[in-house]
Image (spheres, helix red, strand yellow):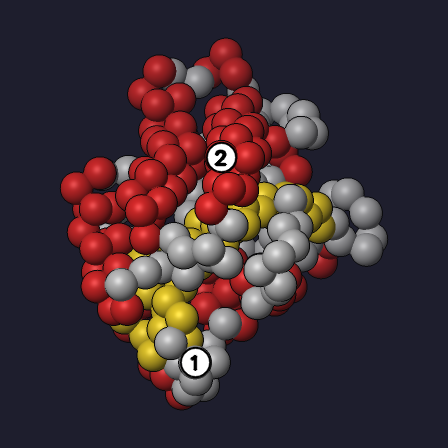
Amino acid sequence: MKVALIVGASGGIGAATARALAHPDRCLVLTGRNEQVLAQLAVEVQARGARAVLAPGDITREEEVARIVATAAAIGGQIDALINTAGSAFVRPFAEITLADWNAQLAGVLTGVFLTCRHTLPWLPAGGIIVNVVSVAARQAFPGWAAYSAAKAGVLQLTNVLREELRPRGVRVTAVLPAAIDTPLWEGVPGRWNRQRMLSPEVVGATIATLVEGSAEAVVEEVQLGHIAGRL
């Protein structure tokens, strides 16, 4: 039974990815901050034949990441897939961003990925995979998104370096760069947004599942996803 650790599984892309990967030959370790939501997702996953293990926690705290990863590794002695989907968006004009705001965005988006990757590395076998969900904001400039864009650009470059370092071990590392996704995140973002022109979490989750289940001898280095209607 293959083990997949899904970070950010309590909503959006993470939950959609868990549903897409819910097969009888897979154990999904679900982590996020909302244990109640994770428990509901576990019921769905198990109904599809997969095994589900809850490991709630805060990935900005190293001791909690260590506990989460240890829970996943104890299931079968290795972690076949690490999928990082967690993250929040802080949107504000650059001149209004405080140092506390900046540090919080980096912690939630970039440092969390660093910690989960760092602690999972010893448990990844040849043929294993890391999928880090980045954003088109890592490359495209959007007013008000300075902290988020900087953090996501950091995730992209971290992913690129990891890919090169892990090639000798046969571990695949992929960056997924989606455009705007229709999740509750937008309810806290200033402005008016056309949700009809956003990708669904299910589309991104299905893409991630395809990457995880792909050939171990080929690495898809990067996937960029946009809505057929174009930019917002």
Q: Amino acid at mark 1?
A: Asp
Query: Considering only vertical position in the picture, is 21 above or below 197?
Result: below
Label 1 Cα neighbours within 10 Å, binned few <14 / some 14-19 / many ≥20: few
Q: Residue at x 75, y 53 (%)?
A: 227
Please name the residue that numbered disc 1 is placed on: 25
Q: Residue furthest top?
A: 95
Q: Amino acid at mark 2?
A: Glu
Which quarter shows the C terminus?
top right
Q: Earlier in the sequence, mark 2 or mark 1?
A: 1
Residue 225 in the image: state x and y as whole percent.
71, 50
Q: Residue furthest right?
A: 229
Which of 39/142 is in front?
39
User: Label 2, label 1: how many angstroms apart (C-alpha)?
Assistant: 29 Å
The quarter of the picture where the N terminus appears is bottom left
* Residue 99 image label: none
Residue under the image location 62 percent in, 63 percent down: 215
- The answer to whether residue 229 is left or right of residue 148 is right
Vertical side of 130 occupied by 149: above or below: above
Left-right relation of 56 to 83: left
Q: Can you see residue 91? A: no
- Examine the rendered structure and indicate whether residue 189 appears above or below residue 151: below
Identity of the residue drawn at 35% across and 23% down: 103
Judging from the image, what secondary structure is the residue with disc 2 in? helix
Residue at image point 40% right, 22% down = 102
Instruction: State whether residue 75 is above or below residue 161.
Output: below
Percent from the top left, x then y, of residue 94? 52, 16
Q: Residues within 10 Å of mark 2 (few under 14, many from 20)?
A: few
Residue 86 appears in view = yes
Q: Which of the pair 212/105 is nearer the observer? A: 212
The disc label shown at residue 165, or none? 2
Q: Position of residue 116 (x, y in %)?
A: 34, 44
Give the image location of residue 57, x and y in percent: 23, 52
